[in-house]
Amino acid sequence: DVKVTQSSRYLVKRTGEKVFLECVQDMDHENMFWYRQDPGLGLRLIYFSYDVKMKEKGDIPEGYSVSREKKERFSLILESASTNQTSMYLCASSLSGARGSSYEQYFGPGTRLTVT
Amino acid sequence: QKEVEQNSGPLSVPEGAIASLNCTYSDRGSQSFFWYRQYSGKSPELIMFIYSNGDKEDGRFTAQLNKASQYVSLLIRDSQPSDSATYLCAVMPSGGYQKVTFGTGTKLQVIP
């Protein structure tokens, strides 16, 4: 059974703080993704990683960075949190196509971040 | 034009009826198509995926893909109140490198 966990369900931070969101998957998936979800805008991809230490920008990378030092862990970093980064953050993982995957993604429970 | 379009709803159906959810996409070379269910306050949960033209059935759910017309649909037979949720369509475009693009979702309400 695929399991993706995220470090916090709810988080409240102040403007200008550095924020770390962590995601861990236990299914040996190569690909990991960070999305944010806002009403009316749907799921938007921030960054993804297809291998350890590899990362690619998604559609809205500004104000974010990521780190993937181990295969199972993918971290999202908000260098200086701002109020417009208040959102639901979702991590997902998927198996590589080279291993016969159909690229379906499995999501963690999400972190609702509020920046005040 | 949005890459993946869904009617936001809400779509209301009576209990026991068939719910039909539709999704259109713009990239003709898209390869794989996914349906996710998302309950309020929860994360998306994969229902099924399809990559060949035609129908794919899994229990009460049927996904239908028509690449020529660039649409994918999800039918839910014998709808239950527990099916009330937002349904997200996701498409992996050509050259997607394992990324997918999500629609904004259709909210389904099943009326008891």
Image: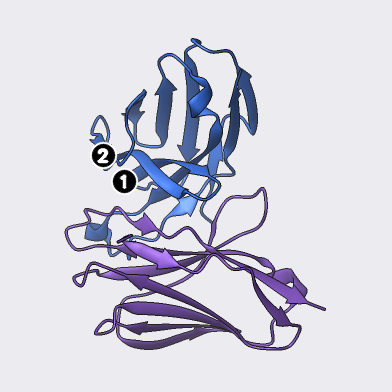
Q: Are marks 1 and 2 in contact (CB under 8 Å)?
A: yes
Q: Where is residue B7 shown, x and y percent of the image? A: 50, 69
Chain A: its colour in the image is blue
Q: Which chain is purple?
A: B
Q: Where is residue A39 shown, x and y percent of the image? A: 56, 47
- The N terminus of chain B lies in which quarter of the figure? bottom left
Q: Which residue is mark 2?
A: A51
Q: Residue at x 19, y 63 (%)?
A: B94
Q: Are marks 1 and 2 on the same chain?
A: yes
Q: Quadrant of residue B55?
A: bottom left
Q: Residue at x 21, y 53 (%)?
A: B97
> Label 2 neighbourhood size at 10 Å, few (<14), some (14-19), many (20+)?
some
**What subunit carries mark 1?**
A
Q: Is residue A53 left or right of residue B35?
A: left
Q: Which of A60/A26 is in front?
A: A60
Q: Where is residue B79 shown, x and y percent of the image? A: 69, 82
Q: Is residue A32 above or below residue B33?
A: above
Q: Which residue is mark 1?
A: A30
Q: Is residue A21 above or below residue B104?
A: above
What SS does tag 1 mark?
Answer: loop
Identity of the amino acid at label 1? Glu
| Furthest residue in direction top, as rendered | A16
> Label 1 neighbourhood size at 10 Å, few (<14), some (14-19), many (20+)?
some
Colour mapping: by chain
Q: Is residue A97 left or right of residue A71?
A: left
Q: Is residue B73 left or right of residue B10?
A: left
User: Which of the two discs, 1 and 2, labels the residue nearer the N terminus?
Assistant: 1
